[in-house]
Amino acid sequence: MTDDLDRACRKMAATCACFHLRRAARAVTLRYDRALAPAGVKATHLTLLSAIAIHSGVRLADLAEIVVVEPSALSRNIALLKRKRLVRTAVGEDKRARTLTLTDAGRATLQKALPLWTKAQAEMEQGLAMELRQALALLDGVTHAARA
């Protein structure tokens, strides 16, 4: 590698917001995935199940906006949750739109997963050097800045 290219790559690795946030997100996701394994759900799916529980009858496009996920990636995850019979779709008021609700199995999965999430969350809070609320506020600011 040339010296200029090497310097540029080292600067990017040391200062890139995207690199550091994605690395942190992958590490946190792996930790939560391990914690949630006994419930048979991954962190990504728990997030979606929780969002659907909160916004029952939500349209797929609106859910994508809520959780900040590309619609195609969300569709793949929703298809998996449907195959596991954790969510169901129905035709919305606009006949072209589908709405999402939890099934009884989806609610049962949430009930099993939430205590596991609570334990993982407490461990994360203990492991953070800063107050979790400050970290979450910082991440919310990053999200808003990136979407502006």
Image (tube, grey):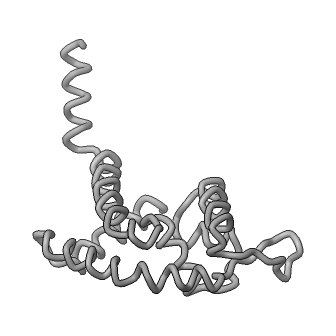
For the point 82% across and 80% down, the residue is 92
Q: Does 20 appear above or below 36?
A: above
x and y percentages locating residue 47 in the rendered image: 48, 72
For the point 22% across and 18% down, the residue is 4
Q: Does 117 appear above or below 2?
A: below
x and y percentages locating residue 23 in the rendered image: 30, 49
**Number of numbered discs overlaid on the protein picture:** 0
For the point 64% across and 58% down, the residue is 71
Task: Please identify the residue farthest to the top as the structure is shown.
Answer: 2
x and y percentages locating residue 19 in the rendered image: 31, 45
The residue closer to the viewer here, 55 or 119, is 119
Task: Please identify the residue farthest to the left as the structure is shown.
Answer: 129
Quick check: 44 left or right of 97?
A: left
Task: Please identify the residue farthest to the front as the structure is shown.
Answer: 38
The residue closer to the viewer here, 45 or 109, is 109
Quick check: 39 left or right of 137?
A: right
Task: Please identify the residue farthest to the right as the structure is shown.
Answer: 95
- The quadrant holding residue 137 is bottom left
The residue closer to the viewer here, 30 or 8, is 30
x and y percentages locating residue 100 in the rendered image: 69, 77
- The quadrant holding residue 69 is bottom right
- The quadrant holding residue 55 is bottom right
Query: Quick one: quadrant of the N terminus?
Result: top left
Quick check: 115 left or right of 111?
A: left
